[in-house]
Image (tube, rainbow, N blue to C red):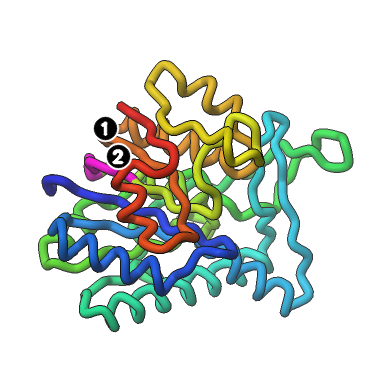
C-alpha cells in the first residue's frame, strides 16, 4: 500500500467552495507529496436538478435518527447526472491547477453495493417500510484499480455512486470515503463538510469536540445530529478498517485541507 496515503471527502452541500478547495488540495500535494484519493458528494447539484425537474426533495429518517436522501428511480437518475457533473467540475479544476486526475464514473466505477430493498423510516410519525429506494450499502472496493491510478501519479476522483445488480445506486459519500480509506490503509481520512466538526450541543459551535478517543466513539454518536451521524459512523468504520486518523472539519473556509491536517475540527483517534 502507498505510504502516507491521504483520502479526502469533499462535501457536496451548499457552502463548500469547490475552486478554493481544489487549490488547497494541489498545495498540499505539492508541499507534502502524499498520494491522495478524492471522494466527493453531490447533494447541492442533485437538489438543483430535482428542483428544475419538479421532483420533491424528500429525506428518510430511520427510527434511530439517521437521515438520508429518498432516492426513487427518477431521483436516482438525476442524482447520477449530478454526481457526474460534479466529478467533471473537479477534474477541470484540478487540471487547471496542473494536476492529472481520473474521474471514476460510468464504466470506471470502483465501488460495489447492495441495494437496500426495504428501508424502515419514520413517515408522519409512523414507521413505514420503503421499497422503491435506490440507495445502497457498500460491499466492495476495487482497491487494485485505485492503486494502479496512484502508481501513474493520477488522483482517483470518486463520486457517491456504486454499481449493483440493480444498476447504479446512491451511496453515502462519507461512508464511501471510509470504505476507500479502509481498503487502502490510509494514514489520514479528512471529511470536509459545511460544519466545523462534531458538536456536543448542535448547533452551538462553541460545543465543538476537538478530539474523540476510541473510548468516546459511542458518546460521539449520541452527540451527533442529522447528517453528522453518518460522519461519525464513517469515522468509526475507517478506523476499524485500519485508517490511522479521521478528521471532520470545515470545508467552507480558506485552505480547508491544510487547516484540517493541522488539527482543526474534530479529530477521531485510532
Q: Nearer the viewer, residue 108 or 223?
A: 223
The total number of labels drawn is 2
Please state the horizontal and vertical placement of residue 115, each as a whole percent of the image. Answer: 55, 48
Q: Which residue is mark 1?
A: 242
In the rendered image, is residue 121 in sight? yes
Seen at 73% across and 78% down, the residue is: 53
In the rendered image, is residue 160 in sight? no
Seen at 55% across and 72% down, the residue is: 82
Label 1: few (<14), some (14–19) or many (≥20) C-alpha neighbours in 10 Å: some
Q: Is residue 230 above or below residue 260?
A: above
- The quadrant of the picture occupied by the C terminus is top left
Where is residue 248, by image quadrant? Answer: top left
Q: Could you say whether the residue bearing mark 2 is in a helix, strand or loop?
A: helix
Q: Is residue 251 left or right of residue 31?
A: right
User: Is the C-beta separation of discs 1 and 2 under 8 Å?
Assistant: yes
Q: Could you say whether the residue bearing mark 1 is in a helix, strand or loop?
A: loop
Label 2: few (<14), some (14–19) or many (≥20) C-alpha neighbours in 10 Å: many
Seen at 46% across and 47% down, the residue is: 174
Where is residue 147, by image quadrant? Answer: bottom left
Tag of residue 182: 2
Please state the horizontal and vertical placement of residue 33, each as a whole percent of the image. Answer: 13, 59
Q: Is residue 81 above or below residue 36?
A: below
Please state the horizontal and vertical placement of residue 18, each as a whole percent of the image. Answer: 44, 70
Please state the horizontal and vertical placement of residue 251, each as a whole percent of the image. Answer: 46, 57
Seen at 30% across and 45% down, the residue is: 262
- The quadrant of the picture occupied by the N terminus is top left
Q: Is residue 123 left or right of residue 268?
A: right
> Which of the two discs, 1 and 2, labels the residue nearer the N terminus?
2
Q: Is residue 83 above or below residue 230?
A: below
Task: Give the residues in magenta.
Answer: 184-189
Give the distance between the C-alpha atoms of the residues marked 1 and 2, in whole angstroms: 6 Å
Amino acid at each position: 500500500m502507498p505510504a502516507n496515503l491521504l483520502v479526502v471527502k469533499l462535501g457536496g452541500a451548499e457552502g463548500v467552495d469547490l475552486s478554493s478547495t481544489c487549490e488547497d488540495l494541489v498545495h498540499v500535494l505539492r508541499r507534502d507529496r502524499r498520494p491522495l484519493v478524492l471522494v466527493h458528494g453531490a447533494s447541492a447539484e442533485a437538489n438543483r436538478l430535482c428542483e428544475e425537474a419538479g421532483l420533491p426533495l424528500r429525506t428518510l429518517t430511520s427510527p434511530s435518527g439517521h437521515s438520508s436522501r429518498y432516492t426513487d428511480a427518477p431521483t436516482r437518475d438525476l442524482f447520477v447526472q449530478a454526481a457526474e457533473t460534479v466529478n467533471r467540475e473537479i477534474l477541470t479544476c484540478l487540471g487547471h491547477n496542473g494536476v492529472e486526475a481520473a474521474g471514476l464514473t460510468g464504466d470506471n466505477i470502483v465501488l460495489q453495493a447492495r441495494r437496500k430493498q426495504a428501508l424502515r423510516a419514520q413517515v408522519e410519525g409512523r414507521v413505514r417500510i420503503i421499497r422503491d429506494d435506490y440507495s445502497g450499502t457498500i460491499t466492495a472496493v476495487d482497491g487494485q484499480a485505485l492503486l494502479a491510478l496512484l502508481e501513474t501519479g493520477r488522483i482517483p476522483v470518486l463520486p457517491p455512486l456504486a454499481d449493483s445488480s440493480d444498476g447504479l445506486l446512491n451511496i453515502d459519500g462519507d461512508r464511501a470515503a471510509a470504505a476507500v480509506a479502509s481498503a487502502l490503509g490510509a494514514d489520514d481520512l479528512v471529511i470536509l463538510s459545511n460544519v466545523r466538526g462534531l458538536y456536543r450541543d448542535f448547533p452551538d459551535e462553541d460545543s465543538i469536540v476537538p478530539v474523540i478517543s476510541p473510548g468516546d466513539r459511542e458518546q460521539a454518536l449520541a452527540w451527533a445530529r442529522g447528517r453528522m451521524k453518518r460522519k461519525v459512523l464513517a469515522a468509526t468504520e475507517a478506523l476499524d478498517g485500519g485508517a490511522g486518523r479521521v478528521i471532520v472539519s470545515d470545508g467552507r473556509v480558506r485552505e480547508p485541507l491544510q487547516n484540517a491536517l493541522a488539527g482543526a475540527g474534530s479529530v477521531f483517534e485510532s
